Image: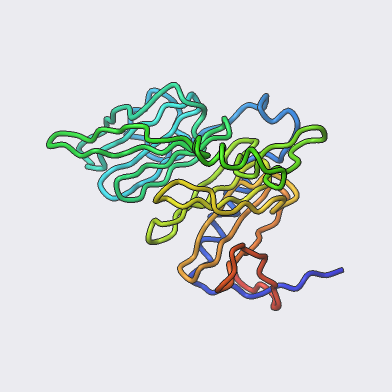
Amino acid sequence: MRHPTTSLPLSLSRMVVFIISHLLSLPPRTPNRQKQRLRYHTAWPPLKATRPPYSPLPPGKHLYSGASDGEIRVWDRNPSSSHGYTVAEGCSSVKSIVVSGDKLFTAHHDHKIRVWKIENSADYQKYKLVTVLPTLSDRCMRLLSAKNYVKVRRHKKCTWVHHVDAVSALALTRDGSLLYSVSWDRTLKVWRTSDFKCLESVQNAHDDAINAVVLSEDGLVYTGSADKTIKVWRKPDGEKKHSLVPLSKSINLL
């Protein structure tokens, strides 16, 4: 049975290429994933990192990088400077980093999303761990009702606010009000950044590990997976949940 497809606007083609590059670079979901050796590359040769950077992100004046040993560093993007300083270390392997205002969000291999407060001073920036997602209050609110539990393995259930495998990518809406996360557990989750509450979880969004998520200005959400597919999601007006966008035309440009 053939699935209908659609043409993508030229303005979104770069997003699709970005997702595809993630699909080609990350391994498929397997039981021995944690035992697989990770490969790294350095996009900025002049920067003298002590550990291999995994997820660099250039937000304005600074460049952030996360390493396989959990170290997060910030770099001055001034061409005359090639040194950075440590924001945090000792966390689980860093998979993705996004910044919104005075908040830094980091995704990790230990199934968690960490939120850091950026405090500006005259000479440098300070970073303070604010919370870990899902928050304690969010977890406690879901414990008592059976409807909040989903099956994650053959004989194991967990509340739907949890990621149960590595959080592989993050994306923020333009206004910074919502955070999207995807995971090797095949879920897509939506978080409200004002109180860090998990608003939605799309279970089994793909048939294999999800490696990338990108948002467009018109409200579409693109997810890329090791199952070799890219899916497009939208939350219709008045609806509480995202649904898969039906595709009706052929794709003629990537």
Q: Residue at x 45, y 39 (%)?
A: 106
Residue reaching furthest front? Answer: 144
Is 193 displayed left or right of 241 in the figure?
left
Who's the residue at 51% across and 68% down the image? 219
Furthest residue in direction right, as rendered: 1
Q: Is residue 101 above or below residue 79?
A: below
Q: Is residue 119 left or right of residue 36?
A: left
Residue 106 appears in view: yes
Image-based side of 27 in relation to 192, left or right: right
Q: Position of residue 186 (x, y in %)?
A: 68, 46
**Image quarter of residue 31:** top right
Looking at the image, residue 238 sits to the left or right of residue 65; the answer is right
Q: Residue furthest left?
A: 122
**Foreground residue among 68 and 91:** 91
Q: Percent position (x, y) of residue 62? A: 28, 43
| Quadrant (top left, top right, bottom left, bottom right) of the C terminus | bottom right
Point out residue 228 in the picture as x, y percentages from the top left corner. 71, 53
* 87 to 194, vertically: above or below: above
The answer to which of 10 and 243 lies nearer the viewer is: 243
Quarter of image, res 130: top left
Q: Is residue 254 visible?
A: no
Q: Which quadrant of the rendered structure holds the N terminus? A: bottom right
Q: Position of residue 201 (x, y in %)?
A: 62, 51
Please say which color scheme the image uses: rainbow
Residue at (51% x, 73% y) in the render: 10
- Please give the name of the residue rendered at 63% of the width and 26% of the height, measured from the top-left corner: 37
